Structures are given as structure tokens and as C-alpha cells.
Image (tube, helix red, strand yellow):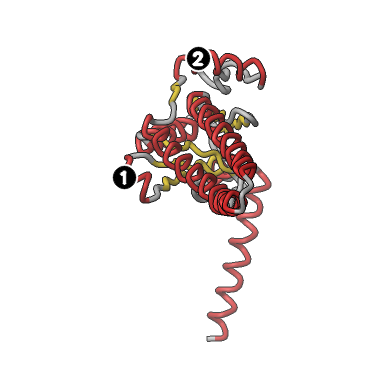
Amino acid sequence: MYNSFRQFCEHLLRIPHDPAPPPGDESATRIFHAAPNFYKYLLLLWTLKTAAVLLIICVSLGFPVVAGAVALVSQGKPAGWLLLLIPALVLAVGTIARLFALAILRLDFEKRWYVITDRSLRIREGVMSVSEMTVNFANVQNLSVSQGPIQRALGIADLQVETAGGGGAARGKHAVRNLHTAIFRGIANAQEIRELIQERLKGLKGAGLGDPEDAHAAAPAPHAEIVAGPQFEMALRQVLAEATALRRAVERRG
């Protein structure tokens, strides 16, 4: 049943196929996905939201309507029980909506891609709204790992890759989207991926493909080339004559 729903959503939402590798050597391409525990994390959040929605429906609509129906029936109006159809209908619609959200959540988990080559990385996520971000390693400025209490218990974390202009504005799962920050969400091997990116960053800088300012700072200053010739010899003789005359003048005064 879920496979049929997935195919229906892929066709209806026009979900693109698997992402192509970003620029770089295809033989060095590594593909990663969110950890299975990340789905459990999302499922926990879905459960909390669903419980909140159903509780709001029951408190704000169910209890008052039931009390009104009982009051009408006690007054000899059996039709008062028909009022119970209102909260029942709202509850049914809310339940269907939350089940649909659960199916979309599973599809979102499956369609999450993290692709790394020797020169860049690409992240694709989302189902209702698909977002894809490509980052060139030459622009990477910082790598950081964030992990909340629930994520720590599940053994997952988020790896944030910040580029020029990022300024560390995107922190945590619910942070505002930052076009200068790429996030590997819900991965179980954050340190491994971080070391892989650091290793490939070093490879780029070693090949002279890193930050141009770093390469300029590391380049040795050119040495001035001294070319001897008649004019140079004449200038030396003049300096020697002036130094000799100055020395004689000092000796005479002494």
C-alpha cells in the first residue's frame, strides 16, 4: 500500500529522480543517507504533533458539543445526538490529515540525499518543496557538528558545512534556512563525513585549488635579481671615493 502511495506522490508532486553527482571525479563519489534512527526521531515529533492536534480538537470542540447533545437529550430532544457528528467528522478529517503527513514524512526520509565528490558536495531534501544545494569545497570555511538530547540518545547528529558569508546563522534543526550553510541532517557518522570533507579540503589546497588568498600568502616573495654592469661599477667607485674623502676630512679635524 505504501509503495503505491509513494509512486502516486512521486508522479503527483513531480519528485525528481536521484540527484546527479556534483562537480568532481565520479570515481571519488560517496553517497550518504540519513540514519534509520533519524526516521524514529521524525516519527517522535510526528507523534507529539498528532497528539497535540487531537487533544485540541477534543478540548475545543468535542467536550462542548457532547455536553450540548446531552443537555438536549435530557430535555426530551433525541435529535441532540446528531450534534456528535460534528466533532466526529472533524476528528476523522484531522486523523486522515495526520496519517497523510506520516506518509509524506516517510517519503521525505527516503528522498534525502548527501553526495560528496573530491571537489564539492550536494544535498537534496524535501518532498512537497524539493531543495538542492551544491557547495564547492574551495568556499568551505567551517565544519561543525550539532546534537540535541534526543539526537544524542538516538546516536545521530547534524553536520553543518558553512561557506563564505555564512556567519554561523543556521544552528539546529529548526534554524532559519541559510543559503550559505549546508546541513547533513540526522546522520549516524557525522565525524566520519566531517573527516572525509576535511581530507578532501586538504587535497584541494595541496593541489593549489584552495583559497587564492592562502596560496598568495604561502607563495615566497620574489628575490630581486642583481645585474652587474659598467654603470653599477661606476656607482660603487663613486660611493667609495665619497667615503674616502669623508674619512680624510674627519681625520684632519681630529
Lower sequence index among marks 2 and 1: 2
Given the image, on which type of amino acid does mark 2 rest? Asn
What number of labels is visible?
Answer: 2
Q: Residue at x 59, y 78 (%)?
A: 249
Q: Residue at x 57, y 68 (%)?
A: 244
| Discs 2/1, front | 2
Indicate the secondary structure of the residue bearing disc 1: helix
Given the image, on which type of amino acid does mark 1 rest? Ala
Q: Residue at x 61, y 56 (%)?
A: 237
- Is residue 102 depicted above or below 180 in this figure? above
Residue located beneath label 1 in the image: 153
Q: Which mark is residue 3?
A: 2
- Is residue 20 depicted above or below 206 in this figure? above
Percent x, y of residue 97: 58, 34
Give whichever of 215, 228 is nearer the camera: 215
Q: Is residue 22 visible?
A: yes
Give whichever of 44, 56 is nearer the camera: 56
Q: CA distance from mark 2 to mark 1?
A: 30 Å
Q: Residues within 10 Å of mark 2 (few under 14, many from 20)?
A: few
